[in-house]
Image: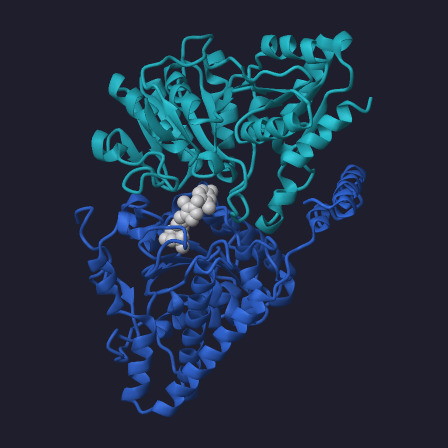
Amino acid sequence: MTTLTLGKALNAGMRRAMESDPKVLVMGEDVGKLGGVFRVTDGLQKDFGEDRVIDTPLAESGIIGTAIGLALRGYRPICEIQFDGFVFPAADQIITQLAKMPLRSLGALKLPVVVRIPCGGGIGAVEHHSESPEAYFTHTSGLRVVACSNPVDAYTMIQDAVRCDDPIIFFEPKRRYWDKADIDLDAPGLPLDRARVVRPGRDVTLVAYGPMVKTCLEAAAAAEEDGRDLEVIDLRSLNPLDMAVLEESVQRTGRCVVVHEAPIFTGLGAEVAARVSERCFYHLESPVLRVGGFSTPYPPSRLEEYYLPDLDRVLDAVDRTFAY
Amino acid sequence: MTADAPRGVDAPPDLVQLLTPEGERVDHPDYDIELTAEEVRSLYRDLVLVRRVDLEAVALQRQGELGLWASLLGQEAAQIGSGRALTTADMAFPTYREHGVAWCRDVDPVKLLGMFRGVNHGGWDPAEHNFHLYTIVIGSQTLHAVGYAMGVQRDGADAATIVYFGDGASAQGDVNEAFIWASVFNAPVVFFCQNNQWAISQPMERQTKIPLYQRASGFGFPGVRVDGNDVFACLAVTRQALRNAREGQGPTLIEAYTYRMGAHTTSDDPTRYRLADELEAWKLKDPIERVKAYLFKNQFADQEFFDKVDAEADALGKDVRARCLAMPDPKPGAMFQHVYTEPHALLDEEREQYLTYLAGFEAGGER
Ligand SMILES: Cc1ncc(C[n+]2csc(CCOP(=O)(O)OP(=O)(O)O)c2C)c(N)n1
Ligand SMILES: [Mg+2]
C-alpha cells in the first residue's frame, strides 16, 4: 500500500502507462518543467524526456488537433487542458474530428487520445477556472466521458483510459487533488465503464461523480444521525452510463437524487433522471430529483459556496423525496 | 540559445529605443518624441503609482484579501507608454494584466481588484472608459478588438483600437485569425504584444521561431519591435501606429520587448522553471529607474519631486488597501443578476426557490 493524493495517483498512473507503452505521450501547456499548474505531470518530463512529455505552444485547438495526428501515427497522447474553461478553443477538434473520425473511417482508424480536464469549483478561482463542462461532451457521440472521484480510482482509471482505443474525456475533480488514500499499486480497478456503489444504503440513492461523490458521502454520514440510510453511487463513467447499477439500486430504495456541480438545466442529471424514471417507474416513491448548479454562469468565488451543492442542499432534496 | 540560458537579456535586433537603461536619450531614424520636463515627470509619476498599486495588490493577495493577482511588475513602461498614447476616443482591449493601461484610462484601481477578490467578474463600464473588461481566455479579445475597429471604420470615426496580448497568446488561433481579419479589412487596430519572455513556465521560443514583430509581414501589415521597458519609445511607437490606423493605413503589430519580473500570478512559482540570473539581468533594465536617471541628469526633477511622488504612491497604496477591505461580499441573489438582459422565466423561478430555501436557514438558524 502506498499513500497518495489524487493528483499524485494520476501522476503514478501516467508514469506506469508510459513505462509499459513507449507510444504513450503527455502533452499540454506547462506540463514539462513546471509539471502542470496542479503538478499532476510533475517529474514526467525529467524521466521520459521532452519527446514524450511535450510542452506545447499556447493553443488548445493545436493540442487536440496534433494529438489526433500523433494518434493516426500510432501514438497514444494524453492531453492536458489546463482548466475546464479553456477546453473550448479545442471544442471544434474534439467534436468534429476526435469524436467522429473513427466512424468516418468505417472503423479503419482508432484515436486513443485521452483529454484530461481538471474540473469543478471550490478553489476560490477567477472566472473560467471552476466549470463543469461534462454535458457538452457526453452529448457528443463518439467520445467516452469519465470522471474520477478519489485517488484509488484515479490511479487505475487513467491507465485504463490510456489503454482504451476510443477517445476519452477524462475529468479530474480539482478541489480533490489533495485528498489522500492508500493505494495498492498492483490491484486492478473496476472497468472504466462501471459505476460503483460507494456506500450501500436502503432509503435513497444518491447519484454523483467527480467532486460531488465526497459531498454525497458526507451527506449520507449526516443523514445516518437522523436515522436515514442513504446509498451513494459514483457513476465514474458519464458516457456510457452504467444503468444496471443504477436500476438495481433505485429498485431497492425507491428514491433517487442526482447531484452535480454543473447547471441542472439539460445537465447529466436530466439524462439520469429520465432513464431511471423509465426503468424504475413502478418502484419509485417520488420523482427523481436533481441538485446542481443554477442557470447562471459560475459565480465569482465569494459566492461559490452558495452555488455549489453542499451537504445541506443534498439533504434538503432527500427530505423532499419523502414529501411525496 | 540553450533552454537554460537567461533569455532576452542582450538587446535584440531592430529594437526601437529612445531612452537607454542608463537614462540616456538616443535618436531613432523612424521614431522621435519631444517631451517637456513636465510630461516626463508625469510619465514617471504614472509608472511609480501603478507599480505601487501592483505591489499593494500582491500584498493583499498574500494576506488572503484577494484570491489571485497577476502582477505587471516590469511591464509598467509598456503599459503606461502605450496607454498614454491613446486619445479618449480610442478603445483598448486588455488581457488580465493591463493595470497600467487601466490607470491611463481612469479606471479606479480598486475596480480592478473586484474580480481578483472574487466579488465580481469585472467591475467597470467599458464604454465609460473606452477600456474593455479583462479577458482571461487567452487571445479571445484580439478578435473583439478587430470587430470593434471595423465598427469604428464603418462609423467614419476619428478613433483607433488597441488590443493587448502576450507572447504566449501569439500562438492561439484566435490571434492569428484577428491578424487576418485586420489585414484584409484594413481595420484601424493596433496589436500590442507584450513579449515578457514567458507564458507561465514556457519561454517564448516555444511559441515562435521568428521575432514576433516579424509575424506581421506574413499577414500583410507592418510590425515593429520596441523596447518595452522604455516608456518614451513605447509612447512614440504606439502613438504613430494609432495615428496610422486613424488615418486609414490599417493595422500595426507592436512587439514590446519586456520582462515579467514577478511570478505569472500569485499562484505561480517561477523558481521551478527559470533562473534567478535572468531576473537580475533584467533588473538593470528597470523601466522606472531609467526615467528617474534621465530626470536627474537633466535636472528636470529634484529630490523633493521624487519624495512627493513616493508619498503620493504610499497614500494611493493605503487608499487602495482600505477600499479593497471595505469591498462588500455580494449577496447570493446577485448570482442571478445580469445573466440575461431580458426577463427569463426559468432563472426567475430558480432564484425565488433558492432565496426561499436560504431564508429557511435564517429562520431556523444554521448556514
Ligand atoms: C485559452 C486559455 N488557455 C490557457 C489559459 C491559462 N493561462 C493563463 S495565462 C497563460 C499564459 C499566458 O501567457 P502570455 O500570453 O505570454 O501572457 P502573460 O501572462 O505572460 O502576460 C495561460 C496558459 C487561459 N487563460 N486561456
Ligand atoms: Mg508572456
Q: Which of B331 and A199 is in front in this view?
A: A199
The chain letter of the blue chain reads: B
Chain A: drawing colour: cyan
B232 or B112, which lies in front?
B112
Q: Position of residue B189 (x, y in %)?
A: 50, 58
Q: In which quarter of the image is residue A295?
A: top right
Q: Is residue A5 left or right of residue B248?
A: left
Q: Which colour scheme is used?
A: by chain
User: Which residue corresponds to the image point at 18% horizontal and 52% vertical from the top-left?
Assistant: B5
x then y, percent, for residue B64: 48, 57
Quadrant where the N terminus of chain A sits is top left
Vertical side of A261 occupied by B326: above or below:
below
Tell me what residue is drawn at x 72 percent, y 24 percent.
A289
Q: Position of residue B365 (x, y in %)?
A: 73, 46
Name the spot of residue A204 as percent of width and height, x first. 68, 19
Question: In which quarter of the view is residue B234 placed?
Answer: bottom left
Q: Can residue B176 be seen in this view?
A: no
Q: Is residue B117 visible?
A: yes
Q: Which of A245 and B260 is in front in this view?
A: A245
Q: In this view, does A47 lie above or below A75?
A: below
Count of numbered tags: 0
**Residue at x-position 37% and y-position 64%:** B73
Q: In this view, does A292 lie above or below A257?
A: below
In the rendered structure, the answer to whether residue B185 lies left or right of residue B169 reads right
Q: Which residue is drawn at 59% across and 10% down?
A: A245
Vertical side of B254 occupied by A43: above or below = above
Q: Quadrant of the C terminus of chain A?
A: top right
Which of the 4 quarters of the picture holds residue A195?
A: top right
